Image (spheres, rainbow, N blue to C red):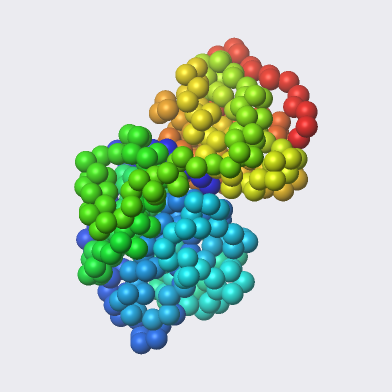
Amino acid sequence: MSKAAAGGDPEAAAHPSETEWAAAVAALRGLPPGARVLLACHVNPDGDALGSMLGAGLGLRGLGLGRVTATFPGPMRLPAPFDALPGTDLLVAEEDADPAPDAMLVFDVASIERLGGLADRLRAAPVGIVLDHHASNPGFGRINLVDPAAAATSVLSDGLLRRLGVPLDAAIAECLYVALATDTGSFKFASTTPAVHELAARLIATGIPVGEISRRLFDTRPVGALRVFGTALARTVLEADGAGGLGFVWTYLTPDDLAAQDQAPSAIEALIDTVRTAAEADVACVVKPVRPGEWSVSLRSKGAVDVSAVAVALGGGGHRFAAGFSASGTVEDVVDTIRGLLPAPAGIRVNSGRISGT
């Protein structure tokens, strides 16, 4: 999913223990010469998934641990602005990924199902390490470096590389910075702690072009995408009594909407960040087309409602403030299902009516 919201609940589970960190370092250091190391992130990867994976991949390649490659489920298409990340030469298509790696590292994946056809490789790998910051992560690796309090998975990547003694260069730093900036909403969300700024300072100190990166991430969008945003915003529905009276705002796009402006689904990942600004609603939702009848759903909360509970119930994952899942059926089916899992005010049943054009 695209998560551009707070990166975890500060009250959630503790950081990985030093024992867990040491186990990960020992497992990687103990790989045989010429080992095959496969890195993977979730389907439809966002900035944190790609940045944390590619930054770690560049660091591991620099250590000479073996042949390092990276992949993710689905078509090997990198949306702008992530196609400009260092380390993209590590990427291989899912069908070309090593079928039996000696070690597999998984980044920003809340549940093993989000790995799609790559899940069996993780299960079979002699070394399987999961790096993640989703509170809903059940710990599906042999070694789990999961910190729900971390602002981004790149925090875990940085922690692993530091413990491996990898020097921080500008290429690694750019990947980790992109991951950190996207998952903190350009350092606007509540996950932006002093530690986040300290990490950002270390990354910036390598000389990365922060202004250029920020323009690429947050201030560049094709006109076609702007028009698609306009379509979605014009059909936004506010249910003021939704989510237990806290307010529920939602919208959707169809495959035809994207086709009309020649836009890929990746062009609308940031739409949820606009919808979530609605002053009258704690919970925001965008239903995005994958293919006819199949959807990717982004959920956001300002904090009163735990949207990860909704997403997990529907086979997805995330944080209290940001979550997502995949769905099928009509948009009305999807929204009705979400509505049924949100808190409901006593004696009130919201019915927004039928949706056309889905």
**Count of numbered badges drawn on the protein:** 0
Give the side of residue 295 with respect to residue 355, left or right: left
Residue 91 spot, x, y in % from top left: 51, 68
Give the residue at x 30% y 61%. Answer: 170
Please say if 109 is above or below 187. below
Residue 116 spot, x, y in % from top left: 59, 60
Q: Is residue 128 visible?
A: yes
Residue 233 spot, x, y in % from top left: 61, 27
Residue 201 spot, x, y in % from top left: 23, 49
Please say if 238 is above or below 179. above
Please say if 48 is above or below 65. above
Give the residue at x 31% y 55%. Answer: 208
Foreground residue among 27 and 280:
280
Farthest residue to the top: give it: 347
Give the residue at x 45% y 51%. Answer: 47
Q: Picture quarter containing residue 34?
A: bottom left
